[in-house]
């Protein structure tokens, strides 16, 4: 953005701030004026019909390939004021109010096409078969469905379809919106969903996921909800059956109607509703199988034995002691020989072929009085990790009841239940079987031997290396999650007058999640826990209840003046109440796999929980104005209050003892292609310019920050004490994101080629950051607003109908997103500030690594040591003379076989020869340069072949998993890459020597573990066939097969370059070893009855 | 139709107005789990919760109290395997992130105390009677002790007596006082409360909560002693001894068994029972390690990351155990209550531990005191009280009385012994702080008698002969007290500040300079004496840089 623009934006903001005090009053005034207008209109019974068309247009409709005329095509103007039907020669004649309107052509088996008249007297409309994807759609917006063409927003809308075995909406979002938002599948566990980032990163420490609005109701996205199952992330979208989704719309702009909740973009999901009085029944059947995922290759028994015998010499054991170790003693007469002389591939204990099936039946119908949509769905998945599975039942009823001519009632009732059997996932040496299968010594056997030397089917207990038995853990664990969700929405509407509609949407929802966890005795190794000692087995249980009330009262006014002016105004007030209660209990050491009752059997009981109430209230106004369907303007504003906001915020204004944030936005579009002066630009079919500017916010600040509060502690087992833990911060407020957008939608070559380009720039202020308290507070840090970050980027999508020949079509699409994220300022009093090292920022510990948050850098960069290989000889090491300081204050010198860490010169250019915190540098950036999708669609008659590639380019990954498998510091099994470790003087290698305990820190967080995470993946390949059918019972039948994740091109050494281990921004790009996505193959049938 | 419209519109406006008008309550939320200011602190139950909350915060200071007090002194030392944090303390190079020198933790205690005091204050007024006064005094005592620790360790303390409850408050500038300035405030704060009894909450499990408070007279005595107001110090210490019947009880004597009036090879060790749950324990900081609370002293000791210095050991070894002129032996039996080593041969009967003389040359030693503490750090006990009393009366020109604390004991028999309680030291004021005629003092014994045999008879090895001038006598006895503190209260956390107090006093009186402390402490740093002495010659380095 250039300076001038920035200036004018500043001015706008300034003026806005000057006036904000008066805004609420204005709001009230406007409200009443509009009410009066509405009243007047309502009183004046029936205004006159618009005058008959002033412009007559003759045209012809043809098939785009054969150029044959098409009969019975419905032609209408964009607002359906006038219409016509083509005759057998494809000819039609229509009267238009304006010579600059847009014609809509609708024909069976063909895509809808919209074409500007541009003052022409005649027009030729070529239609494409409906196998092609279509830009001219109705999109779901703030005020309901609207024509994509007339929307001034930067948005992407898709209709739900499932030909990939997708289980949740996130999958569809990823498959269809690749370049419009960055969607990263969390893991290979079914239904875990994806982390979604719209237009860069708009926060550092709080929720970065978009707002989900489902059927008009704002959902709690549960981003802060933690599970007791490692590697599991709650996905709010998993309760919706993908077959129930009518469409999904992504709003990328500053859509201020959602005010303090919209900084991360908004995703509107609309579920299907009854549309026709003709009863239709659809039946969907999908089955899939999934293969074992890839994992990092680990050593076999021979390699491992060499490794471990080498390592053990560095652990200070004498040769005699080493000889007595059962796994190194080859005397077959010893009783332990069989136990320690195997070559086990532990992954066999863990993985199986996954299997999914999904059935859904939905009925759509009704009568004059009521339309309904009823669905029943069942999905089940058997995971690729043994014993894991998922089952989902869902029921939904959406009904629209016409009570009187003017009064209506919308009713949505949804229920879903998800049952999961789970197991800890990710790097965890005690309870994650997938991880244990990598690190467990291959010398051991999964099963016990009898004294006579024959193998039994009894699982062995945890081993001499303190590593459990993955098979035994799987068999004896009992880890479940049950999630019940129910919601009911009532939406009464009343048409006060043709222009004025009043509506209230009320929603009540309950989400309850019960989690149970059991880590078995003896099969899992004991964990040393501070305050408990050895935890031999443990049980945890958690119940989370989330109740929400949502209410949205709206008054809508729409009016058309003088033929060309259309005005739509919405005034509304929205209230959200959310109650989150979680109760957690854990216990240890029942010392039996059969006594698993928490009270009684377990000791060291510990309880925890939260009880957070949140309320937010928003008053909003949305004004849409268009002139002659050429100029479109949307302005919106919301005034938001929340129980989370402090009472004395810096921004916004104060009223009723609370602080209120004000969020205005303006978006405009100019449909250039409708202008008469474009008459001769025949090659251009569509040209639309869009511009938008708005303020949005993020209200996901911690609860109760504006109050002083105490927390209860346990004192000497039996007494309770209260400790002051939070000081009131009445200034705490929302983060403010200012968004600006410029976009072009352009279609050329008779709509064969469509481009959408958006350039955006956003600035987030008042970032929530951790601050250092003054010593007198007696506390460490508090949350406060301060700091700014910017995102500048571009989104591009191209869609081409490459071939459209007789019954054969080829469509190609590519989408790409690019952003530059930069932290532009941070407050001075940061907690854990690195200012002593000359860095304006702080670091956060993330999986044994460090993530830097610093001015001038993007969010989430990795901060550690740079390496320059391995010292191959003693001379080389002595010449370098690099040291570390030990925890006892002494120094140790790096020797041959140790890593060479870069010694960074200080401000005076002096290298101190000591490798310490001063030598940390930025070693990687998890933000991609480019991400998106590439799609191809081939169709021949009723046969369709689709490919979908997803890609990410230029993102760095911290391979935490590999850092644990290549550390060479303990007896756990290691990656085969460690076979190249340094073992002898003069050896040139990239892997340092293996030393027990890694005293020199060769495995520390360094660029050894940072990799290029770029990839391109054939996400979906699908083939579907619409069986032409015409029977009394069957309306249509579609049959399809698809393959997911067939191949991935990447240099990444980990199992899968696509993962998102946690929701937080600072955790992106960290491979915590969650279950990799594997290949899956699906088969589906869709019956229409 | 029109009517319906109007009604509906009216309703709509009404609803909206209601929404707006009730905004105030509409956005207020509360939590069942967290307790806010408005809801908390006003009932007597709440003050109990507050008290336990404060004790849990006080626990964070326990490790620091001992390690900062001892590692900077001459008796406790680090080893090669000690963590850098410990080595930093030992070398007077404490960095800002040293986990045992976090000033935040001290202010956490202060602020929680302030909050509770504030609420107790208001409830006292509300009820028109001093119902909560005992709790009030208890919390004031904890706060005063904590403030003393801040000023002693960090040179100055920021003073505030209103709880900091908002971020804004925390950013204010608070007056910063040196120890002497602070002492005046604390003295006027505590004086009115010195006769208030502490609350009796009783036992929590096996823990006696009455040990959790710092007797106000002890604190006042300390404050006066630091300020140089010896008369008031002596009065407060004495009053505490008198009122609480605190004695150095001869029952806790460790002694060699005798045969035919000669020292045998077996000793009965009783002395260390004085500091576990005995009547001699006055104040402890209790340090449970469950529920996320930490206490490191035990493991540091067991891992040999803190060990007794050679100096500490030779202090005991160089004493003479006296049975009679003919039968005496080297060594103070208090060593065997202060230290423990793996080869030690002891056996326990119900009340007595028996030790058989053997090879005690074991390196390194464990610190027996810390093992006896069992998750309680003893801050105040009677022996320390008597030694502080001795320090005060000595400075009131009563060196013989002070010496009697060490050697003969202040009991009702000795009171009439003119050699011990010399007539010249009994003056018009003496009744106020040196009347030990009461039978409550009958068990009092000389502090040394509990480890060094029949001291009262010893005229050879341990003697005090009046010096040329009173000042010389006072300095002589003060040195004896300082040495006795090392024998009696080694490793308990007060060593560095005791040396500092004496050294500062001598500097102030023109009786010496920083070398008094510098020489004593640097002697521990064998091979590095000069460097450590150089650091300690600057009294600024006696404090931790903030």
Image (cartoon, grey):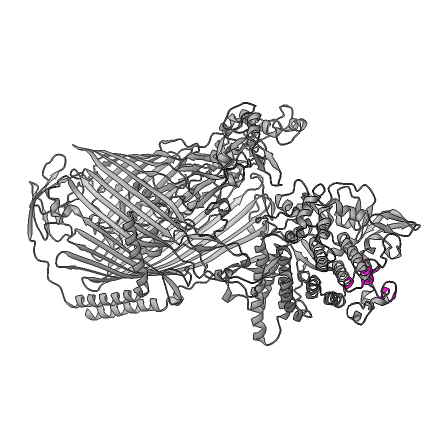
Q: Is residue A145 left or right of residue A285?
A: left
The quarter of the picture where residue B359 lies is top right
Residue segment shown in magenta: B392-421
Image quarter (top left, top right, bottom left or bottom right) of the C terminus of chain A: top left
Query: Camera-side residue: A376 or A315?
Result: A315
Q: Is residue B533 visible?
A: yes
Furthest residue toward bottom? B128
Q: Is residue A951 left or right of residue A971?
A: left
- Rendered position, A254 above or below B195: above
Residue B544 part of the magenta-drawn span = no
Q: Is residue A835 left or right of residue A1051?
A: right
- Rendered position, A893 above or below A276: above
Image coordinates of residue A886 in percent, x first then y, are: 60, 39
Furthest residue toward right? B260
State the count of labels. Answer: 0
Residue B399 part of the magenta-drawn span = yes
Q: Is residue A1063 visible?
A: no
**Residue at 56%, 23% in the rendered image:** A984
Image coordinates of residue B534 in percent, x first then y, are: 67, 47
Image coordinates of residue B435 in percent, x first then y, are: 81, 68
Image coordinates of residue A1067 in percent, x first then y, are: 44, 43
Query: Camera-side residue: B50 or A489?
Result: B50
Q: Is residue A37 left or right of residue A869?
A: left
């Amino acid at each position: 953005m250039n300076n001038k623009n920035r200036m004018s934006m500043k001015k706008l903001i300034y003026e806005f701030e000057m006036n904000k005090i008066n805004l609420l009053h204005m709001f009230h005034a406007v409200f009443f004026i509009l009410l009066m207008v509405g009243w007047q209109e309502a009183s004046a019974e029936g205004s006159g019909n618009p005058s008959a068309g002033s412009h007559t247009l003759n045209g012809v409709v043809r098939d785009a390939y054969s150029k044959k005329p098409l009969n019975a095509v419905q032609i209408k103007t964009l607002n359906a004021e006038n219409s016509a039907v083509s005759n057998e020669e494809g000819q039609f004649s229509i009267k238009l109010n304006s010579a600059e309107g847009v014609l809509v052509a609708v024909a069976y088996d063909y895509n809808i096409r919209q074409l500007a008249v541009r003052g022409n007297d005649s027009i030729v409309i070529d239609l494409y078969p409906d196998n092609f994807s279509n830009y001219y759609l109705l999109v779901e917006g703030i005020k309901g469905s609207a024509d994509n063409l007339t929307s001034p927003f930067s948005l992407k809308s898709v209709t739900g379809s499932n030909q990939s075995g997708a289980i949740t909406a996130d999958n569809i979002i990823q498959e269809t919106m690749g370049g419009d938002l960055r969607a990263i599948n969390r893991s290979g566990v079914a239904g875990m969903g994806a982390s979604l980032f719209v237009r860069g990163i708009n926060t550092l420490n709080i929720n970065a996921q978009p707002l989900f609005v489902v059927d008009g109701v704002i959902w709690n996205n549960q981003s802060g909800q933690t599970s007791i199952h490692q590697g599991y992330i709650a996905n709010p979208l998993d309760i919706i059956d993908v077959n129930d989704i009518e469409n999904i719309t992504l709003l990328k702009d500053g859509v201020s109607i959602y005010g303090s909740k919209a900084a991360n973009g908004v995703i509107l999901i609309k579920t299907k509703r009854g549309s026709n009085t003709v009863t239709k029944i659809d039946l969907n059947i999908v089955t899939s199988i999934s293969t074992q995922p890839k994992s990092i290759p680990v050593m076999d028994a021979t390699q491992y034995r060499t490794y471990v015998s080498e390592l053990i010499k560095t652990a200070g054991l004498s040769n005699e002691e080493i000889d007595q170790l059962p796994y190194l003693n080859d005397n077959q007469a010893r009783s332990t020989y069989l136990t320690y002389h195997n070559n086990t591939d532990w992954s066999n204990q863990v993985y199986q072929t996954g299997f999914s099936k999904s059935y859904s039946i939905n009925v759509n119908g009704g009568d004059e009085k009521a339309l309904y949509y009823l669905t029943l769905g069942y999905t089940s998945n058997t995971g690729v990790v043994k014993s894991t599975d998922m089952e989902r039942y869902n029921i939904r009823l959406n009904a629209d009841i016409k009570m009187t001519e003017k009064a209506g009632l919308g009713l949505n009732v949804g229920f879903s239940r998800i049952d999961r059997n789970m197991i800890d996932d990710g790097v965890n040496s005690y309870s994650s079987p997938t991880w244990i299968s990598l690190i467990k010594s291959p010398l051991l056997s999964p099963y016990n031997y009898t004294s006579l030397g024959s193998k039994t089917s009894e699982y062995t207990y945890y081993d001499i290396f303190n590593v459990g038995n993955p098979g035994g853990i799987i068999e004896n664990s009992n880890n479940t999650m049950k999630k019940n969700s129910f919601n009911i929405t009532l939406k009464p509407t009343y048409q006060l007058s043709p222009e004025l509609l009043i509506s209230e949407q009320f929603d009540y929802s309950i989400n309850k999640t019960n989690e149970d966890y059991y880590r078995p005795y003896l099969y899992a190794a004991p964990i040393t826990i501070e305050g408990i000692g050895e935890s031999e087995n443990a049980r945890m249980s958690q119940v989370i209840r989330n109740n929400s009330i949502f209410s949205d009262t709206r008054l809508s006014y729409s009016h058309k003046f003088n033929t060309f002016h259309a005005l739509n105004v919405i005034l509304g007030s929205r209230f959200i109440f959310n109650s989150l209660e979680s109760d957690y209990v854990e216990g240890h050491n029942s010392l039996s796999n059969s006594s698993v009752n928490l009270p009684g059997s377990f000791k060291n009981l510990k309880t925890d929980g939260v009880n957070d109430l949140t309320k937010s209230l928003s008053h909003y106004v949305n004004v849409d104005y268009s002139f002659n369907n050429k100029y479109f303007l949307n302005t919106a504003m919301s005034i938001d209050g929340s129980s989370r906001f402090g009472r004395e915020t810096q921004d916004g204004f104060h009223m009723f003892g609370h602080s209120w944030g004000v969020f205005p936005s303006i978006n405009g579009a100019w449909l250039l292609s409708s202008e008469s002066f474009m008459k001769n630009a025949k090659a251009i079919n569509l040209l639309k310019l869009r511009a938008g500017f708005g303020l949005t916010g993020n209200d996901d600040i911690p609860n109760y920050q504006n109050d002083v509060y105490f927390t209860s502690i346990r004192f000497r087992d039996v007494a309770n004490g209260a400790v002051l833990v939070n000081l009131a911060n009445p200034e705490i407020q929302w983060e403010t994101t200012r968004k600006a957008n410029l976009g072009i939608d352009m279609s050329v070559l008779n709509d064969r080629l469509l481009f959408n380009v958006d350039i955006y720039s956003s600035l987030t202020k008042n970032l929530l950051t951790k601050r250092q308290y003054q010593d007198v507070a007696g506390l460490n840090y508090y949350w406060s607003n301060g700091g700014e970050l910017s995102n500048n980027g571009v989104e591009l999508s191209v869609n081409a109908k490459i071939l459209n020949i007789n019954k054969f079509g080829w469509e190609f699409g590519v989408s790409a997103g690019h952003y530059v994220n930069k932290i532009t300022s941070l407050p001075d009093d940061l907690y854990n500030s690195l200012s002593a090292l000359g860095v304006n920022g702080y670091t956060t510990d993330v999986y044994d690594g460090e993530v830097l948050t610093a001015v001038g850098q993007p969010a989430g960069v990795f901060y550690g040591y740079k390496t320059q290989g391995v010292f191959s000889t003693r001379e080389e090491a002595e010449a370098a003379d690099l040291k570390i300081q030990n925890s006892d204050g002494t120094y140790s010198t790096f020797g041959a076989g140790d890593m060479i860490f870069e010694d960074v010169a200080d401000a005076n250019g002096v290298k101190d020869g000591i490798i310490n915190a001063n030598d940390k540098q930025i070693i990687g950036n998890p933000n991609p340069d480019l991400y998106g999708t590439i799609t191809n669609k081939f169709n021949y008659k009723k046969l369709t072949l689709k490919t979908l590639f997803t890609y990410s380019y230029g993102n760095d990954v911290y391979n935490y998993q590999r850092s644990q498998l290549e550390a060479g510091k303990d007896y756990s099994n290691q990656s085969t890459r460690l076979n190249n470790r340094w073992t002898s003087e003069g050896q040139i290698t990239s892997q340092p020597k293996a030393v027990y305990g890694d005293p020199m820190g060769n495995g520390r967080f360094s660029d050894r573990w940072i990799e290029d995470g770029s990839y391109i993946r054939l996400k979906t390949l699908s083939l579907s066939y619409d069986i032409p059918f015409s029977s009394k019972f069957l309306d249509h039948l579609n049959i399809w097969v698809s393959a997911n994740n067939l191949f991935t091109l990447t240099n990444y050494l980990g199992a899968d370059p696509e993962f998102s281990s946690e929701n937080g921004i600072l955790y992106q790009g960290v491979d915590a070893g969650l279950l990799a996505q594997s290949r899956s193959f699906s088969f589906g049938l869709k019956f229409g009855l | 139709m029109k009517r319906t419209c109007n009604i509906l519109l009216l309703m709509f406006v009404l609803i909206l107005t209601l929404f707006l008008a009730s905004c105030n309550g509409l956005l207020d939320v509360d939590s069942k789990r967290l307790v806010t200011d408005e809801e908390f602190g006003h009932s007597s139950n709440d003050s109990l919760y507050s008290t336990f909350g404060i004790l849990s915060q006080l626990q964070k200071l326990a490790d620091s109290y001992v390690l900062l007090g001892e590692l900077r002194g001459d008796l406790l030392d680090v080893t090669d395997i000690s963590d850098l944090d410990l080595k930093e303390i030992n070398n007077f190079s404490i960095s800002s992130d040293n986990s045992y020198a976090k000033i935040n933790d001290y202010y956490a205690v202060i602020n929680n105390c302030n909050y509770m005091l504030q609420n107790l204050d208001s409830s006292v007024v509300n009820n028109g009677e001093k119902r909560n006064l005992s709790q009030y005094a208890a919390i004031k005592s904890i706060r005063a002790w904590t403030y003393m620790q801040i000023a002693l360790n960090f040179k100055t303390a920021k003073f505030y007596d209103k709880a900091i409850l908002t971020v804004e408050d925390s950013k204010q500038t608070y007056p910063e006082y040196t120890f002497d300035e602070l002492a005046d405030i604390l003295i006027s704060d505590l004086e009115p409360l010195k006769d208030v009894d502490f609350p009796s909450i009783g036992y929590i499990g096996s823990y006696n909560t009455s040990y959790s408070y710092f007797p106000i007279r002890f604190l006042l005595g300390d404050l006066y002693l630091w300020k140089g107001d010896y008369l008031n110090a002596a009065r407060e210490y004495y009053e505490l001894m008198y009122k609480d019947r605190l004695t150095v009880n001869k029952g806790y004597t460790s002694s060699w068994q005798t045969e035919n009036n000669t020292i045998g090879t077996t000793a009965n060790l009783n002395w260390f029972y004085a500091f576990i749950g005995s009547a001699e324990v006055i104040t402890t900081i209790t340090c449970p390690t469950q529920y996320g609370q930490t206490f490191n002293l035990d493991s540091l000791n067991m891992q040999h990351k803190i060990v007794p210095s050679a100096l500490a050991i030779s202090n005991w070894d160089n004493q003479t155990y006296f049975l009679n002129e003919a039968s005496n032996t080297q060594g103070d039996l208090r060593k065997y209550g202060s230290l423990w080593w793996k080869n030690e041969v002891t056996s326990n009967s119900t009340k007595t531990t028996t030790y058989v003389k053997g090879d005690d040359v074991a390196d390194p030693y464990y610190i027996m005191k810390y093992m006896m503490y069992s998750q309680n750090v003893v801050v105040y006990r009677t022996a320390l009280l008597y030694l502080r009393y001795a320090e005060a009366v000595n400075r009131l020109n009563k060196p013989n009385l002070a010496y009697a604390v060490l050697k003969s004991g202040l009991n009702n028999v000795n009171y009439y012994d003119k050699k011990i309680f010399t007539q010249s030291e009994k003056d018009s004021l003496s009744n106020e702080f040196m009347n030990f005629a009461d039978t409550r003092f009958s068990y009092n014994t000389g502090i040394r008698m509990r480890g060094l045999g029949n001291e009262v008879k010893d005229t050879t090895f341990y003697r005090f002969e009046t010096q040329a001038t009173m000042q010389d006598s006072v300095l002589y006895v003060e040195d004896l007290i300082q040495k006795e503190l090392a024998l009696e209260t080694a490793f308990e956390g007060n060593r560095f500040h005791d040396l500092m107090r004496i050294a500062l006093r001598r500097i102030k009186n023109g009786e010496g300079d920083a070398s008094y402390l510098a020489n004593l402490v640097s002697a521990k740093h064998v091979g590095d004496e000069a460097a450590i002495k150089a650091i300690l010659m600057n009294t600024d380095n006696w404090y931790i840089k903030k």
